[in-house]
Image (cartoon, rainbow, N blue to C red):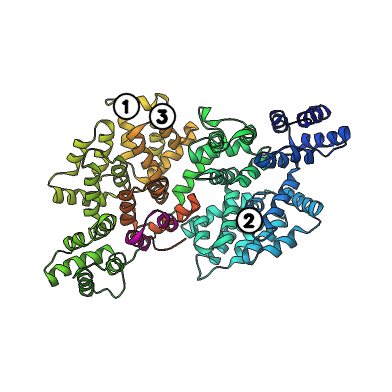
Amino acid sequence: FDPAADAETLYNAMKGFGSDKDAILDLVTSRSNAQRQEVIEAYKCSFGKDLIEDLKYELTGKFERLIVSLMRTPAHHDAKEIHDAIKGAGTNERCLIEVMASRNNNQIHGMVEAYKDAYGGDIEEDVIGDTSGHFKKMLIVLLQGTRDESGVVNTDLVEQDAQDLYAAGEEQWGTEEAKFIMILGNRSVTHLRMVFDAYEKIAECSIEDSLKSELSGDFERLMLAVVQCVRSVPMFFARRLYKSMKGLGTADNTLIRIMISRSETDMLDIRECFRLRYEKSLYNMIKDDTSGDYKRTLLNLCGGDDDLAGEFFPEAAQIAYKMWEISSMTKVQLRPTLRPASNFDPAADAQALRKAMKGFGTDEDAIIDIVAKRSNAQRQEIRQTFKSLLGRDLMKDLKSELSKNLERLVIGLMLTPAEFDAKMMKKAMEGAGTDEHALIEILVTRSNEEIQAMNAAYQDGYKTSLEEAIQSDTSGHFCRILVSLVQGAREEGPADIERANADAQVIKTLCITDLADACNAESDDMEMKFMSILCTRSFPHLRRVFQEFVKCSNKDIEQIIKKEMSGDIKNAFYAIVCSVKNQPSYFADRLYKAMKGLGTDDRALIRIMVSRSEIDLFNIRKEFKDTHDVSLHEFIQGDTSGDYRKTLLTLCGGED
């Protein structure tokens, strides 16, 4: 490293007509921040000019923002981000949350001093003047930079803090926010990790779920960010990077801020976490989402493509292990969006429905207000009463009065869950093509009891067994997976530790012998064992199997399936793994795919909204918002129309 030579290189790259951008970006991204500060000093000594001002003059757009930001010290970079977030009319709360939640004490102190140096003001006063409520209080606590960093953990205090958090939230009506602020804002990272584990045992839900149910708005987002950073700072930033690039448009300020601030800290760990969570490398996502010199600079900071690596790095494997552990410990309270109507009167509902369909025209609003606001059991009573009182078949009347998607949705709601599932399976297999995703979704996510009821309904409705229908419509290994699942004979109960270790070893051996070959060979004994494990073991047991697999192989089962398998076999096994890890999240992903892009998969949308509204649609809503940064309500509103939309939004149950 020669700062004088670098200064001269940069000077030559900018003098004359045009700029040698390649020379600038190659030099700037291959020096540490400390070295860049020396280059700035050498530039001024040699040429009597301000390097940052020259760069601003020569470069433009996002490339200029990125290069100029790289030339600032980390403390001044953070200070500028905070200043930009609070100046002017609006406030960029997400920037405040990201920076404040993720920095250690030294970084906070450096930022406070740099803010005073650059802007002549007090950062705390400016934050107070621009924010309010509990959000403001937590930001001020974090700005003190006084988190315990001793690493010493008092076991008694861990239990006390866990109990205090439970008492301040889940245990009482209302929330004692001050207790959350004090504990989450001051305790050490090691201590808080133990508190979160203890809290899950007391509350029977994760601290994240409690925060989501107890808090709201920017305060909720800030506290969740603190928890995520306590669990894993690299995973927190992996999530932030993904959200900055997914969908239409790129949040370039977020992308630039993170790539600069983490490139000399934990970028390799972030890359590993990114690949672990999103099944693609950060490098490739940046490559697909940016362009030109801006892209080249970001890729240099990224440092490499993890999709080229053969297996997980230790950090990613540890996080995968912890994710399965959290999944196995967390007791999710399933919450529906649709509950039985109070003061239910089936005769009055039957009469109201007849009135809505009698004469010229149909009162769709009246139909929706009844059908979408009654439980399925209540709808069955209405069906029976309609026939008893009026001598008419309600289903036939509804079919004759309604049309298209609204008819399909309302009829789906009027069927029993078993009849509806049977009909969805029939629809997935009739005609020229097969909707394999629908077959997988239904068979993977239904309980033994639900599958057996569906089998009976299918036999009754279509005069053939569902198993025979599957065998005639699918083939090979995929057919065998579906036939195994349609038996409705998955084991139930907790994990068997010794057996889980043995199952993990079977999967590890299978990976060594090439999973793809084994799963395509019909007679292969290992393939049968793999199918048997995934299709017959209980979900709690499979969580333990997948956790032990990480430990013994340094690989994650999700990545293995996605990398080594293909087609319907991959989709079936991947759906099982996702459902085992977090079933509401699996459904949230299915809903997102049903509506994103051009066109809507209305059959999938109807199937999920009908089948989950009385089980866990509220949980699905939460997962949808967490993953996609947009509410399910908003997504449905933008993707559907008319009475069909109104019915779906009623089932959705609210805007998050």
Please indicate whether residue 266 sits to the left or right of residue 343 in the image.
right
Q: Alpha carbon of mark 1 to alpha carbon of mark 3: how far?
A: 11 Å
Instruction: Name the element at disc 3.
Output: helix
Q: Quadrant of residue 274?
A: top right
Q: Which residues are magenta?
A: 634-650
Q: Callout 1, which amino acid?
A: Asn
Q: Callout 3, which amino acid?
A: Glu
Q: Position of residue 101 (x, y in %)?
A: 64, 52
Mark 1 lies on residue: 520
Mark 2 lies on residue: 92
Q: Dot 1, how many residues are within 10 Å of its Cα: few (below 14), some (14-19), or many (20+)?
A: some
Q: Is residue 284 among what the camera can see?
A: yes
Mark 3 lies on residue: 564
Q: Is residue 148 among what the camera can see?
A: no
2 or 1: tag closer to the N-terminus: 2
Front-lying residue, 318 or 434: 434
Residue under the point 62% across and 46% down: 254
1 or 3: tag closer to the N-terminus: 1
2 or 3: tag closer to the N-terminus: 2
Q: Quadrant of residue 65?
A: top right
